[in-house]
Every structure is written in structure tokens, then in C-alpha cells.
Amino acid sequence: MTKGRLEAFSDGVIAIIITIMVLELKVPHGTEWSALKPLIPLLIAYIVSFIYIGIYWNNHHHLFQAVKHVDGRVLWSNLHLLFWLSLVPVVTHWIGENHTAVVPVSLYGVVLIGAGIAYFLLVRALLARHDRESALAEAIGRDFKGIVSVALYAVALLAAPWSTWIALAIYGVVAVIWLVPDTRIEKRLRE
């Protein structure tokens, strides 16, 4: 099976996720700059979540540059990832409305760890479909970034009841880790 339909479907779902998130931003009541003040927490949550969705889209795109074939396991793994990403608009709005409350910050982390695990499983499914000498397998290696990300999300979830700020900071660290897509894939494909 070719990868084209999977990529097109994923791009469409991610575009819808971003659209849903922006539709949650409401028009301010009033015409003064001060009317924007109540929207700032939701806007910040939107920006962070937009960046997260962009990171997943960008890394997904880079990952699939090295993919030659997909199978049913890969399709289900990809759908698993899209499921978790589809929950981002809900937790974004909830955290934006409630700022640093423990349950919204924790649920945001649950969605992030779910997406992180799903991405890790997608990579595993792709590696199972490709030879050990494939560009994909050589570029991914042991997937240190994937393992570290899931571990950091777990630490953030454990920290959230004591300090939501620490949990939010850890979510940010993981985003920074993935902000630049895996250069090993591009390097391997150039060789």
C-alpha cells in the first residue's frame, strides 16, 4: 500500500484540528484594547497548542519522507495518533478558560502523553514494515527523542498536582526538543 492516502488524510485531519481550535477564540466584547485582556489566557493556550500541532505535523511529514510502504498496522497507528491530536482543541479551551488549574493542566498532559505514545508506536509500526538497512531505520535508530518525550510527559503528569507550573514547563521542554524535525532523516535521504 502506498503512503499517499495516509499522508493526505493526516494533513486533512490536522487542518480540521487547527480550524476547530481557532473557532474557539471568541470575538472580544468591546472595542478597546482592554477588551482583549480576558482573552489572553485562551490566546496563549491556542498559540501553544497550535505550535504543538505544527510540531506533530512537521515531524510526521519528515518521518514519512523516508517511508516506502504502509500496512494496516501503520494505518491504525496513525489513526491512534490522530485521535489524541483531535482532543487538543478541547483541552486547549479548558486550560485557556481555567489557566493553571490542576485538572485541566493534567488532562492537557494526558492528551500530550497519549499523542507522544501514539507517535512512538507509529514509528515502531513503520520500522517493523521496513528493513533494518532502510533509510528510515538508520535515521530513527533507537528513537531516543520519542522515549525521552514520553518519560518527560510522565514526570509532568506526576508533578502537576504539586505544581502546574512545573508541568507546563516540562510540556514546553518537550516541544522544544521536537521543534526542529529530526535532521537524521533528511541527512540519511541526502546520502
Image (cartoon, rainbow, N blue to C red):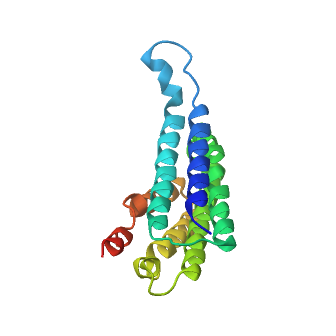
Residue at image location 69% in from the left, 71% down from the top = 72
Picture coordinates of residue 77, whole percent (x, y) = 65, 68
Q: Is residue 82 visible?
A: yes
| Quarter that holds the C terminus | bottom left
Residue 97 appears at what percent x and percent y?
61, 37
- Quarter-of-image position of residue 26: top right
Q: Is residue 54 left or right of residue 159?
A: left
Q: Is residue 137 above or below residue 59?
A: below
Nearest the eye: 174 or 95: 174
Whether residue 161 appears in this view of the structure is: no
Left or right of 88: which side holds 52?
left
Extreme residue toward the top, this view = 31
Q: Nearer the viewer, residue 174 or 124?
A: 124
Q: Farthest front residue? A: 1
Pick whichever, 103 or 61, lies toward us.
61
* Residue plotted at (54% across, 79% down): 127
Measured from the top left, where is residue 157 in percent x and y?
A: 59, 63
Q: Residue 128 appears in which quarter of the rendering? A: bottom right
| Image quarter (top left, top right, bottom left or bottom right) of the N terminus | bottom right
Q: Residue furthest bottom?
A: 132
What residue lies at 56% left-to-right and 44% top-to-bottom? 15
Identify whether 68 is placed above or below 23. below
Classify residue 92 by image quadrant. Answer: top right
Q: Residue at x 46, y 81 (%)?
A: 137
Query: Residue 96 appears at what percent x and percent y?
Result: 57, 39
Q: Across the whole image, how many numbered discs are drawn on residues?
A: 0
